Image: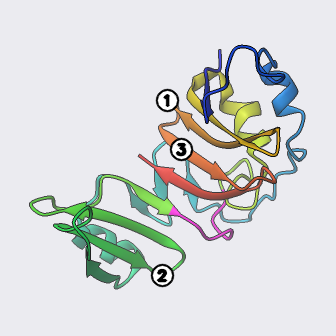
Amino acid sequence: MLSLFLLPLLAQDSPVAGLAMTDLIETLPACTPKTSAAPTLDLQKSCVAGACEGMSIQQLTEALGEPTCEGGKDTVTQGSTFCDWPGGISGHYREGETGPGSLFVEDPAHRSPEGYGVGSSLACFIQDYGDGASSVEVRVLDGRLYITSLRLKEPHISVSAGLDGVVTKIQLN
């Protein structure tokens, strides 16, 4: 069952309190997968283009090419290194770590065998993986609710979307 995480928190007497998750899902664009002849996104294994979450920087570079990296510039990100690889893939890691704890995919060219990726409707991920969701983030704007993020246990990924319900980033954990 999907759990609902509301931002900002709604008062019990709010006109939208008690709204069913199915009502929110119905506001998303229809799921229309875009299949690829050579899928590069493996959601089950948390891999993209031959690079997998948990690999070292050296292994990621061998799989993806040379990254552009820079250190954190403020007190929050100081001690972290942020890397962008060709193909819209990024990650960051802290001092002492050999590689990023997560990879971020932002290029719509990367597709799963099911045809899911950046540019897909969030409805696709809810339809196929929603039972394994650990949280759903909902934003409130002008009295309307928008599903903007889905965190899954299986596969272990997070999917972010704009207010239009279209996926903008996939985090492979």
Q: Earlier in the sequence, mark 1 or mark 2?
A: 2
Q: Which residues are magenta?
A: 105-111
Q: Earlier in the sequence, mark 3 or mark 1?
A: 1
On the image, the x and y values in percent for residue 89 come to 48, 70
User: Looking at the image, which residue is at 82% across and 45% down?
Assistant: 142
Which residue lies under the disc numbered 3? Answer: 158
Which residue lies under the disc numbered 2? Answer: 86
Please name the predominant secondary structure of the magenta segment in the image: loop
Colour convention = rainbow
User: Looking at the image, which residue is at 37% across and 65% down?
Assistant: 91
C-alpha gap between disc 2 and disc 3 = 21 Å
- Identity, as a three-letter code, of the amino acid under mark 1: Lys
Task: Name the secondary structure under disc 3.
Answer: strand
Q: Give the crowd class for mark 1: few <14, some 14-19, many >=20 residues within 10 Å.
A: some
On the image, the x and y values in percent for residue 110 come to 63, 65
User: Looking at the image, which residue is at 82% across and 52% down?
Assistant: 33
C-alpha gap between disc 3 and disc 1 = 9 Å
Q: Residue 5: say if magenta.
A: no
In the rendered structure, are the residues bearing label 3 and label 1 in contact, judged by CB atoms less than 8 Å apart?
Answer: no
Task: Name the secondary structure under disc 1.
Answer: loop
Task: Name the secondary structure under disc 2.
Answer: loop
In the rendered structure, are the residues bearing label 2 and label 3 in contact, judged by CB atoms less than 8 Å apart?
Answer: no
Q: Residue 108: say if magenta.
A: yes
Which residue lies under the disc numbered 1? Answer: 153
User: On the image, which quarter does residue 62 sit in?
Assistant: bottom left
Q: Please tell me which residue lies in front, 123 or 145.
A: 145
Left or right of 127 in this view: 84: left
